[in-house]
Image (cartoon, rainbow, N blue to C red):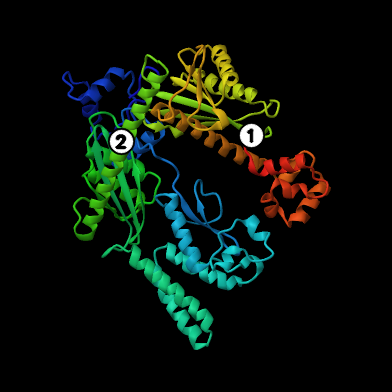
Amino acid sequence: MLDDNGQVLYVGKARNLKQRVSSYFREKQASVKTRSLVSQIHTIEVTVTHTEVEALILESALIKELQPRYNILLRDDKGYPYIHVSADPFPRLSLYRGAKRAQGRYFGPYPHANAVRDTLDLLQKIFRLRSCEDRFFHGRTRPCLQYQIKRCTAPCVGLTHQDAYQRQLHDAILFLEGRSGQVIDDLVQRMEGLAAELKFEEATLCRDQIVELRQIQQRQHVEGERGDLDVIACAMHAGAACVQVFVFRDGRLLGNRAFFPALPEHEEASAILSAFLGQYYFDKAIPTEVLLSHEPMDASLLAQALQERAGRRVALTLRPRGERARWLEMAQRNAEQALAARWASQAGMRRRLEALQEALSIDHALSRLECFDISHTYGEATVAACVVFDAEGPLKADYRRYNIEGITPGDDYAALRQALRRRYLRLRQENSRLPDLLFIDGGKGQLAEAGEVLEELQIAGVIAVGIAKGPERKPGLETLHVLNEHRLVNLPADSIALHLIQRIRDEAHRFAITGHRQRRAKARTGSVLDTIPGIGPQRRRALLRQFGGMKQLTRAGVEDLAQVGGISVELAQRIYDAFHIDG
């Protein structure tokens, strides 16, 4: 169903399409949501599939791609993290997120990055496999700290043979595949064989690994459970919903994650879970069983679709018993607590927006705020960042970064002007939503630049505010400059409106610095020293020779740097700033 601008309003499926569509146009329509939807329909497009399962899969794909306003939307759709085992002679284990382009094996997906980091930490502790990047690995001449604390066998400097390393890797992969019992059996046999050969030190290492693995089994196995299992519970309150997912693989709890779908009005838990399952498992590994707090709509059809996608039987279980019932109860309780916390946070956000509206004497409600900040190091790799907040808090999907080119290095005014023009010219061309308030991290000069851009693009209705830092840049002493108003606004340090402004500004600063550092690191293929004016080959060699390497050099103070022959105090300060200060 599309509106008169061609925007998709709703995607739905039905065995009897005529009956389903005609139901939307009954004279007495009880649902407020349906009445609102029908009032906007201009065109209905139809796709015919061979089976209901194909229709369900197509519906999930279209909802995921088009994000229709009147469908239940799974908004938190970031790429899930995996453990990547590289295809090297001495493979590296690392956290991986994104397209699987690198060669090697992938294990996951895990619910969140912390679950991956915890697992990697265990693997390092038990199997002593390397986690360092290739550049670090190939550049070593002596073992690093990981070897000293018994987290690595130092293959980089030849302290372990490839066969021994591959044997440990084999055990680690069995562990990741959920076959920790087999690993323990193999280790027991290996330990006994080494003891028989009087190789007691190596046998002791096997024993320690067995102890660690048995402790992990005791800590992570679900009583009476084996195999893959997801536990999914839904909680609702005041028109909002939270879906909590607990992930078990081979009986081990890998972690949990909360989702907050965007809902049309008057939806029920059965409809939410039905929409969630179709979108959640669209591109993820499907377990053999899913425990559910509510029966989803079209449960049998969903189960059939999941089975076809997985290539095996998938059970949707509603009323489990014993230990599994307790896991479902815990997921339900977590969903309710997460929803309550989010609701409290959103209510607090609304209070802050109302306080900000009052503090700036604005006569209409505020629903969208944007803030810009500029980051660079002495004009190098300048990046402008825009962050967006709405009534629910940060709207990270709308964050944007701009690589600034063609300006005098260090000209923050020109950088801000370029970023603002690129941002709002595009919003105007796409007829996208403009902010109610535009914050600029700076004083009158930066605010004037913003005003000129808004006037040039003929953008009206956007209130621009400059955030000038107080004396000694102390938080709580900021002064607000409002564009085209000859007044300053100074809010009390305990004002919740000021706290909101500080949060938005700090988020813009964080986002800008992160982008700048990434751009600077990408641009620097050589040493940081090569980018500092006044540092040539001779001074570079003298510095590295004096401090014994780049790592020690980055830790040196200005006074220490100035003691090197040919390095003045001014040049020492520039070197120090290049390693420590981001603009």
Name which quarter of the figure residue 219 lies in. bottom left
Residue at 33%, 67% in the rendered image: 218
Callout 1 crowding tier (Cα within 10 Å): few <14, some 14–19, many ≥20 = many
Where's residue 176, x and y in %?
Answer: 43, 62
Where's residue 545, x and y in %?
Answer: 78, 56
Can you say which quadrant of the picture contains the C terminus?
Answer: top right
Residue at 21%, 44% in the rendered image: 295
Callout 2 crowding tier (Cα within 10 Å): few <14, some 14–19, many ≥20 = few
- Per the image, label 2 sits on a secondary structure element best described as helix
Give the labeled residue for mark 2: 344
- Per the image, label 1 sits on a secondary structure element best described as strand
Q: Residue furthest left?
A: 28
Q: Which of 437 and 400 lies nearest the eye of the viewer?
A: 437
Identified by mark 2, the residue type is Ala
Disc number placed over residue 559 in the picture, else none: none
Work out whether residue 547 can be spotted: yes
Q: Which callout, 1 or 2, points at the residue further toward the start of the chain?
A: 2
Residue at 66%, 44% in the rendered image: 579
Q: Which of 134 and 333 lies nearest the eye of the viewer?
A: 333
Give the labeled residue for mark 1: 376
Identified by mark 1, the residue type is His
Name which quarter of the figure residue 41 lies in. top left
